[in-house]
Image (tube, rainbow, N blue to C red):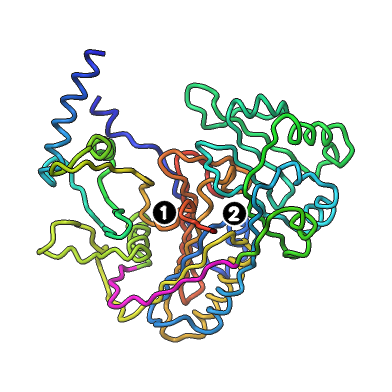
Amino acid sequence: HAIKRKIKETETKQTSLILLTVGAALNVDVLKYDEETLSALLRVPSRGLVKLWSSLTLQGSYKNQTCAFRVLQVSPFLLALTGNSRDLRLD
Amino acid sequence: MCADLSRTPRNLLVCERSSFLDEKNRLSFQVEQLRFNYKVSLLLPECGSAPSHLESTLNSFSRFYLVKKLPIYELLDKDFLQNAVYQGSVYGLSFGTRIDEDNCVALMPNGRLVLSLDKDSYEMLGFEGRPSRFNHRTCSRFVVPVDLKERSMAPGSPGYRRLLRALSSHLKLQTDFLISHHPGGGAALKALLSRYDWSERRPEVCSRRLSDLVCPDLRSCDPHSLLEWLGAADADVSCQNSSSSFLSTLTCPEPTTTLAAALSASVSGLLLPQDVQRLVEQLRCHLQQEQTASWASVTVHGFADGPVSWGDEEHGVLTGGENFYNLLMFHDHTYRLHLATGPQDGCPP
């Protein structure tokens, strides 16, 4: 457990570094941001997916405001993100 | 550890080039194999609004029905089997259920009923099935496929009675259900629908006009870049990569042309392969008739949470549940077809 905690602490510091310094570690593209739904489309090279996903998961606050990121879908195909049947609403 | 972090789940992309004039082209078969279609998107160049024949095709996609809290044993009802399953094709899918979390049900046009169950539900059901292909270390998911058209599952047979007892007593599986019938439509499903809270739905059609769309060379563009560009057009993502913005480096693959106008249209709901086939034929006519139309793109997305995707292949969701294909048709009857699946899928046909 001790080892795990240590890794998590290190990762959290690395996470902040990644998020604060855009492009320093990973080339992340913000393809689209929708202010109404507070959702975004991001693009990252495959080798950086786990780092980016971990960073988003661990990011709990920004400028002293609590926040959370929820990853809705991940795919190597941008085209797949425009046809997610979980968006189908039949109320 | 770094090597592990760079690995991502595998996806499959099948790429094909053929011609409608080639007798051996398998497009009709491939379209028919993706049974449960959620969304069909079109991209038409040099087109500000949908031509009337295409608009009427989009608006005439078959209606489907949403049944609230349908007990799944009702799919074994003798009248339903006689009037719907044995005559024509039923397309049925549980709605609001997630294949990675909940129990999901699909009724396929070939009469196969597929249940995708978690371990507890499978054990309660007490009917033969098999572990999911996509179980990781423990068997947490099971698939129960039943051929309702087989003689061993005819009403009154021992197998039929066992399944009926399993679904009505042991595991009282009940979900919201999307259902459609070809060619009978609602008439074939009337008896089933009348017993529950149901509503008829029309597939939703949307369209928008795109201006100054930067477009790659569609014949020579590599598949991944092509699909990325199509995704960008569909998602309304800019490929400008202007020097004043550091947000995105996405660009259109070179060489490029700029289209003054393009039409992006989509229809979504429970869509039948027969309607997709009809749309493809209408697009072919459009390409032959319109001088300015040199190509047309159709993307068809399958349901992310269906127990099956292509044919009878088991389907699951890991990081995503994509199962889609893109058909890029040209004026000279040739086409490029790309069929893609996610990590928990078999190979597309």
Q: Residue at x 14, y 37 (%)?
A: A16
Give the secondary structure at mark 2: loop
Q: Is residue B213 magenta?
A: yes
Q: Position of residue B103 (x, y in %)?
A: 59, 37
Give the secondary structure at mark 1: helix
Could you tell whether B315 is left or right of A16 in the image?
right
Q: Are the residues flagged by discs 2 and 1 from a single subunit?
A: no
Along the viewing direction, whichever of B77 and B210 lies nearer the viewer: B77
Q: Position of residue B137 (x, y in %)?
A: 48, 22
Answer with the quarter of the image where residue B63 lies: bottom right
On screen, B268 above or below B72?
A: below
Number of marks drawn? 2
- Pointer 2 with pointer 1, Cβ within 8 A: no
On screen, B348 above or below B117?
A: below
Q: Residues within 10 Å of mark 2 (few under 14, many from 20)?
A: many
Q: Chain of mark 1?
A: A
Query: Which residue does the numbered mark 1 point to in the structure image?
Result: A80
Task: Examine the residues drawn in magenta and state their main secondary structure.
Answer: strand
> Which amino acid is tagged 2?
Phe
Q: Residue at x 61, y 33 (%)?
A: B117
Quadrant of the rendering where the N terminus of chain B is positioned? top left
Q: Position of residue B6 (x, y in %)?
A: 27, 34
Q: Residue at x 57, y 47 (%)?
A: B309
Tell me the CA gap for discs 2 and 1: 15 Å
What is the number of the mark on residue B144?
none
Magenta stretch in the rendered image: B202-217
What is the number of the mark on residue B36?
2
Q: Is residue B206 magenta?
A: yes
> Which amino acid is tagged 1?
Ala
Q: Residues within 10 Å of mark 1 (few under 14, many from 20)?
A: many
Q: Position of residue B11 (x, y in %)?
A: 42, 43
